[in-house]
Amino acid sequence: MNNNSDLGKRFWHWLKLGLADHSIVINDTKAPVHVVGGTYFLVSPGIFKRFSTEVLSNEDQWKVVQKRFQKLDMHIRTQGQNIHSVSVEGPSKTGLLKGYLVKDPYEVSQEIPPDNWVLTLLKTQSEKDHSDE
């Protein structure tokens, strides 16, 4: 089953199972998935590298997996951008995470965890431009 066209679906299935059985941690310091703005935030490239390592036994495949995931159109695109940024405000440091926002969190799980309180979704540059007018 090494068909690239289904890598996106395989990733999505793996993600849903992993979140359901808690083998993929949510909202933790090093977690590859967080909840922001009421939906899932998939940290990229981390979550794709993990899938590629665990499922395909080849971390180098992560870019292909990410592209196939994008083709599923399960993520929010803003002003043509696939990748969103969130700021992380922890007790000892602040940082930036980049990743995908899932369009419909109920596609992933019927019970969505609360937002990660240390994360803030940042507006894209074009959203900032419009809000300054």
Image (tube, rainbow, N blue to C red):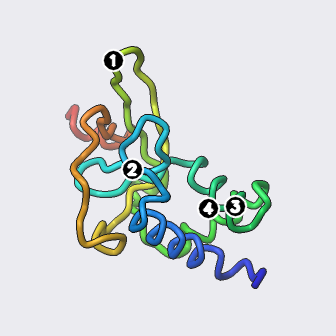
Nearest to N terminus: mark 2 or mark 4:
2
Q: Which residue is mark 1?
A: 91
Q: CA distance from mark 1 to mark 4?
A: 31 Å
Where's residue 47, x and y in %? 56, 53
Q: CA distance from mark 3 to mark 4?
A: 10 Å
Q: CA distance from mark 3 to mark 2?
A: 19 Å
Q: CA distance from mark 2 to mark 1?
A: 19 Å
Q: Which residue is mark 3?
A: 52
Query: Which quadrant, please, contains the N terminus?
Result: bottom right
Nearest to N terminus: mark 3 or mark 4:
3
Q: Residue at x 33, y 37 (%)?
A: 122
Where's residue 9, x and y in %? 56, 78
- Residue at the limit of the structure toward the top, as seen here: 92
Q: CA distance from mark 3 to mark 1?
A: 32 Å
Determine which of the numbered discs, if any, sits on residue 66 in the image: 4
Q: Which residue is mark 2?
A: 26
Q: Are marks 2 and 4 in contact (CB under 8 Å)?
A: no
Q: In the rendered structure, which amino acid carries the disc numbered 4?
A: Gln
- Place residue 75 in its image quadrant: bottom left
Q: Indicate the secondary structure of the residue bearing disc 4.
A: helix
Q: In the rendered structure, which amino acid carries the disc numbered 3?
A: Ser
Is 10 above or below relative to 96? Answer: below
Nearest to N terminus: mark 3 or mark 1:
3
Q: Indicate the secondary structure of the residue bearing disc 2.
A: loop
Q: In the rendered structure, which amino acid carries the disc numbered 2?
A: Ile
